[in-house]
């Protein structure tokens, strides 16, 4: 069976990021913790899916996604200083949530959900970075297809009844391995 729309796909891969001599391993999906997703349901980056479409069980893949194919260039305008008091709950700051390096779910003034990484916490302000963790990165994927099968109607329906996905990894299959990685609930191939 080939990877195509509404197929349940299981992959293993290494994701390396960077250019030239500055390439480093960012995440892995292993046989014990593979990337699993339903192809063609907008849970993965379109460019990621394009590179694996048509592959079958046991086939290997190796491809590179540029920032233009993935999460775009790093944008300094997405680093914002916000009043610290907007993080208060019942008049108090939750120090288990608001600390440097933590990813915090937020909502903009239009009601859009987004994830922000805490850069610094000051006395009166918090600096947040709303770039995707892989913005500006060239991503190199290499791996193989473990399994391809028809997705069940229940698996497909579950995608549309869930609360949605938050990336920041790798994942809704969104990259927090960062969440679980590149798609397994967190992966870097995630479209969020």
Image (tube, rainbow, N blue to C red):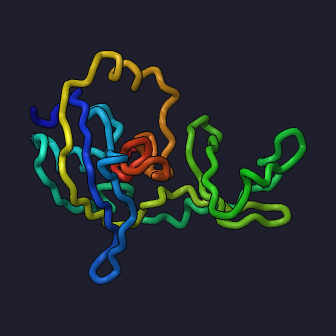
Rendered image quadrant of residue 40 = top left
Question: In which quadrant of the rendered image does the C terminus lie?
Answer: top left
- Horizontal relation, residue 147 to residue 179: left or right: left
Q: Which residue sits at x=64%, y=49%?
A: 104
- Horizontal relation, residue 148 to residue 156: left or right: left
Front one among 68 and 180: 180
Q: Considering only vertical position in the picture, is 157 above or below 138?
A: above
Question: In which quadrant of the rendered image does the N terminus lie?
Answer: top left
- Horizontal relation, residue 79 to residue 142: left or right: right
Q: Which residue sits at x=43%, y=46%?
A: 186
Q: Considering only vertical position in the picture, is 2 above or below 137?
A: above
Picture coordinates of residue 52, whole percent (x, y): 17, 46
- Residue placed farthest to the bottom in the image? 21
Q: Which residue sits at x=40%, y=26%?
A: 159
Picture coordinates of residue 37, whole percent (x, y): 31, 36
Q: Considering only vertical position in the picture, is 120 above or below 169?
A: below
Picture coordinates of residue 169, whole percent (x, y): 48, 52
Q: Which residue sits at x=90%, y=43%?
A: 91
């Amino acid at each position: 069976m080939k990877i195509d729309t509404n197929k349940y796909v299981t992959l293993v891969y290494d994701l390396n990021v960077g250019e030239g001599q500055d390439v480093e391993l960012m995440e892995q999906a292993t046989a014990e913790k593979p990337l699993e997703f339903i192809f063609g349901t907008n849970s993965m980056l379109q460019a990621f899916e394009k590179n694996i479409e048509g592959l079958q069980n046991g086939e290997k893949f190796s491809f590179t996604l540029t920032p233009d194919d993935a999460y775009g260039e790093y944008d300094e305008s997405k680093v914002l200083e916000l009043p610290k008091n907007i993080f208060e709950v019942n008049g108090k700051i939750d120090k288990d949530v608001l600390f440097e390096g933590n990813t915090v779910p937020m909502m903009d003034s239009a009601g859009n959900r987004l994830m922000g990484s805490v850069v610094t916490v000051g006395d009166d302000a918090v600096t947040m970075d709303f770039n995707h963790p892989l913005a500006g990165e060239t991503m190199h994927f290499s791996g193989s297809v473990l399994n391809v099968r028809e997705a069940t109607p229940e698996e497909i329906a579950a995608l549309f009844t869930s609360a949605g996905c938050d990336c920041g990894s790798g994942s809704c299959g969104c990259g927090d391995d960062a969440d679980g990685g590149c798609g397994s609930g967190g992966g870097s191939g995630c479209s969020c």
